Amino acid sequence: MSNQFKKIDKEFCLTDNSVNVYGYRLLTAGLDLAQYKKNPIGFLMHDREGGVLVKWEDLRIEGDKLFGKPVVNLSHPKGEDIAAQVENGFINAASMGKIIVLEASDDKDLMLPGQTGPTVTKWFPREISFVDIPGNHNALANLYDINDNELNLADFVKPKPKEMSKILLTAALLTALNLSDKSSEDETAKAIQDLVDTAGKVPGLEKDLADKNTALTAKEKELKDLKDEAVKKEVQDLLDKGKADKKLTTELATELADSFAGNPAGLKKVIDAMPTQTLVTDQLGDKDASAFAGKKWDDLYASNDLEAVRTQFPDLYEQLRKEKYPNA
């Protein structure tokens, strides 16, 4: 025996496949013992702040059980006392601490009678503590992931419908669920299940609403397009009528089409206020080119016929212009 530690020749069953008091179980076959052997320490009642109390040696698996022998740290404030209690048979239990869950399963084939939580199929502990009662609340062995983030056991455990009624409901919740403090277990369970079912339908309702909004947007666009097309046609009809009534030239109609593209009412007011235009070609009547035979540029200018010739007889106009302005 050393002054610093004491190896006790007494085997402890450290874990097995049974269901623990928290409703889940650890499969011994899934224990990564090599990971734990890298640092096989333990505390007292999982109290890390109290310091390392024990190191486990001679670890072995037999069937579904893991066995090990303790080496007690006598330099620990309670080391001497705990070693004596172990040797005298007052401490006979150990508990897995800070369990790192690598894989877990809800497979019903792995469930044992009384099991409500998952079956942890691949795992290893960070420490194994001496405890007074294995699996009691004070010796709670929390579950963690590989990055030491704590796992919530509630993520794995699904309450039975009968257990729902045991939840303490506030007056506000009772009112919201249309229950009273005298409601039966079945009524409470049904109300909660209805709430869960309704919550489950929310994603579908959201999609349905999104689809309807998309359809509504498409309809709104279709109506807008129809309205724009109707306005465009009304504007064009007004311009066509304005030209037919000899109020608009083609050039002026083009300008008004741009200015009043979305305002047929305004365009109608402008066209209605315009007088009918008398075109030069209308003033010429049945005159032909022979009526101007032998006349010069200045003659036509003096008789105000020059513009009529330019409009109705462009070739004659061009001939007279070249005679008048040969160098132009």
Image (cartoon, rainbow, N blue to C red):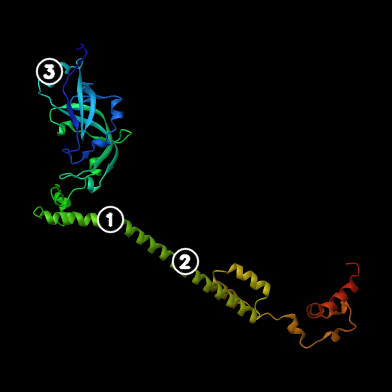
Using the image, determine if residue 48 lies above or below residue 242.
Answer: above
Which amino acid type is shown beneath numbered disc 3?
Answer: Ala
Expressed as whole percent of the image width and height from the top left, the position of residue 303 reads 83, 81
- The residue lying at 75 percent from left, 82 percent from top is 281
Which amino acid type is shown beneath numbered disc 2?
Answer: Lys
Expressed as whole percent of the image width and height from the top left, the position of residue 16 reads 19, 35
Give the mark toward the camera: 2 or 1.
Answer: 1
Q: Are marks 2 and 3 in contact (CB under 8 Å)?
A: no
Q: In which quarter of the image is the C terminus?
A: bottom right
Which amino acid type is shown beneath numbered disc 1?
Answer: Gly
Residue nearer the viewer, 321 or 273 = 321
**Residue at the extreme front:** 63
> Is residue 85 at all visible to an observer of this figure?
yes
Relative side of 75 to 312, left or right = left
How far separated are the C-alphas under marks 1 and 3? 57 Å
Expressed as whole percent of the image width and height from the top left, the position of residue 123 reads 28, 35
How far separated are the C-alphas under marks 2 and 1? 33 Å
Q: Residue 221, labelled with which disc?
A: 2
Residue nearer the viewer, 326 or 41 = 41
Give the mark toward the camera: 2 or 3.
Answer: 3
Q: Which of marks 2 and 1 is nearer the N terminus?
A: 1
> Is residue 301 at all visible to an observer of this figure?
no
- Residue beneath disc 3: 84
Query: Which type of secondary structure does the marked residue at label 2 adopt?
Result: helix
Q: Which of marks 2 and 3 is nearer the N terminus?
A: 3
Label 3 Cα neighbours within 10 Å, binned few <14 / some 14-19 / many ≥20: some
Expressed as whole percent of the image width and height from the top left, the position of residue 8 reads 17, 19
Relative side of 170 to 316, left or right = left
- Residue beneath disc 1: 200
Query: Which type of secondary structure does the marked residue at label 3 adopt?
Result: helix
